């Protein structure tokens, strides 16, 4: 019901002050203040320009992000596969170092020749000599090489906050697996030449090809020792051989330098005989 107009004295005309206010539903909407309207328009424009990235910056209620590197599923996959990636990297690095020492250089080189190249030449002459080395002689160099990254990792665990450790967990798992398998590479290589007295758990790991199997490594020791260089797990030996990875590297280096691969290895073998 509309409000009743106020009574007018005789002879008076109705003016604006005496008119009843219009009904609420008929009132025209009032525009917002200018400053508020500009702020609202600017926020809408920024939201439209940001698109999915702007939405990704906000965490959904009761869960983690739905896409990107911080997605819960992506983090779980990274935490699961990063140690495997570390093991594969260690296997590739063992093959790269082994290939370089077997294929290039000379025993007569100063420092490097006697310290690094000569043991590889002698190993081809007497493969079981490594089984007569003690633990320190077998693993000392690799353990010393991994001390710095292990110390850095220990420092992070002692000084970083739990949130920071959570963010770097996949990377730290990758580095830890890489360090452990690099440290154990020479010991695993020694086990691949040991045919008596191995612990059962070592034989189990070899049989399941978790570490370098003995039969697998025999392929490398067939003259001229030009294949199956990876000696940590041996997982990469077959795929690298199928794509002729080492042959391609040797062809490139020979074309650039003129050096023939394994020339010194052959001379050393003939000299010993």
Image (cartoon, grey):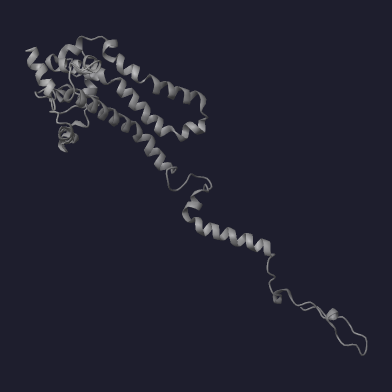
- In the image, what residue occupies the spot 34% across and 31% down? 83
Q: Is residue 188 left or right of residue 125?
A: right
Q: Is residue 49 left or right of residue 77?
A: right
Q: Nearer the viewer, residue 176 or 142?
A: 142
Q: Is residue 263 left or right of residue 101?
A: left
Quarter of the picture containing the N terminus is: bottom right
Q: Is residue 37 above or below residue 232?
A: below
Q: Nearer the viewer, residue 123 or 272?
A: 272
Q: How many marks?
A: 0
Q: Is residue 91 visible?
A: yes
Q: Is residue 136 above or below residue 73?
A: above
- In the image, what residue occupies the spot 74% across and 76% down? 23
Q: Position of residue 222 (x, y in %)?
A: 9, 23
Q: Quadrant of residue 185?
A: top left
Q: Is residue 201 visible?
A: no
Q: Position of residue 89 (x, y in %)?
A: 29, 31
- In the image, what residue occupies the spot 34% across and 24% down? 179
Q: Nearer the viewer, residue 25 or 105?
A: 105
Quarter of the picture containing the C terminus is: top left
Q: Nearer the viewer, residue 92 or 208?
A: 92
Q: Position of residue 29 (x, y in %)?
A: 68, 72
Q: Position of residue 171 (x, y in %)?
A: 40, 33
Q: Residue furthest bottom?
A: 11
């Amino acid at each position: 019901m509309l409000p009743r107009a106020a009574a007018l004295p005789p002879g008076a005309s109705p003016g604006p002050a005496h008119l009843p206010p219009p009904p609420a539903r008929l009132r025209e909407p009032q525009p917002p203040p200018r400053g508020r309207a500009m702020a609202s328009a600017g926020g809408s424009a920024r939201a439209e320009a940001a698109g999915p990235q702007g939405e990704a910056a906000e965490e959904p209620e009761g869960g983690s992000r739905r896409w990107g590197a911080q997605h819960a599923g992506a983090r779980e996959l990274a935490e699961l596969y990063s140690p495997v990636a570390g093991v594969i990297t260690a296997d590739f690095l063992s093959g790269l170092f082994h290939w370089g020492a077997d294929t290039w250089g000379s025993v007569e080189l100063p420092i490097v020749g006697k310290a690094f190249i000569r043991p590889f030449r002698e190993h081809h002459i007497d493969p079981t000599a490594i089984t007569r080395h003690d633990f320190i002689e077998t693993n000392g160099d690799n353990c010393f090489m991994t001390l710095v990254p292990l110390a850095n990792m220990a420092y992070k665990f002692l000084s970083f906050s739990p949130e920071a450790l959570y963010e770097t967990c996949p990377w730290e798992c990758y580095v830890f697996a890489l360090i452990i398998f690099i440290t154990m590479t020479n010991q695993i290589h020694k086990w691949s030449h040991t045919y008596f007295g191995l612990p059962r758990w070592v034989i189990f790991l070899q049989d399941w090809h978790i570490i370098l199997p003995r039969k697998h490594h025999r392929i490398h020791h067939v003259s001229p020792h030009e294949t199956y260089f990876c000696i940590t797990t041996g997982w990469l030996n077959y795929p690298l051989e199928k794509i002729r990875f080492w042959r391609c590297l040797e062809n490139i280096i020979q074309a650039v330098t003129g050096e023939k691969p394994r020339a010194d290895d052959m001379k050393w073998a003939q000299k010993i005989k």
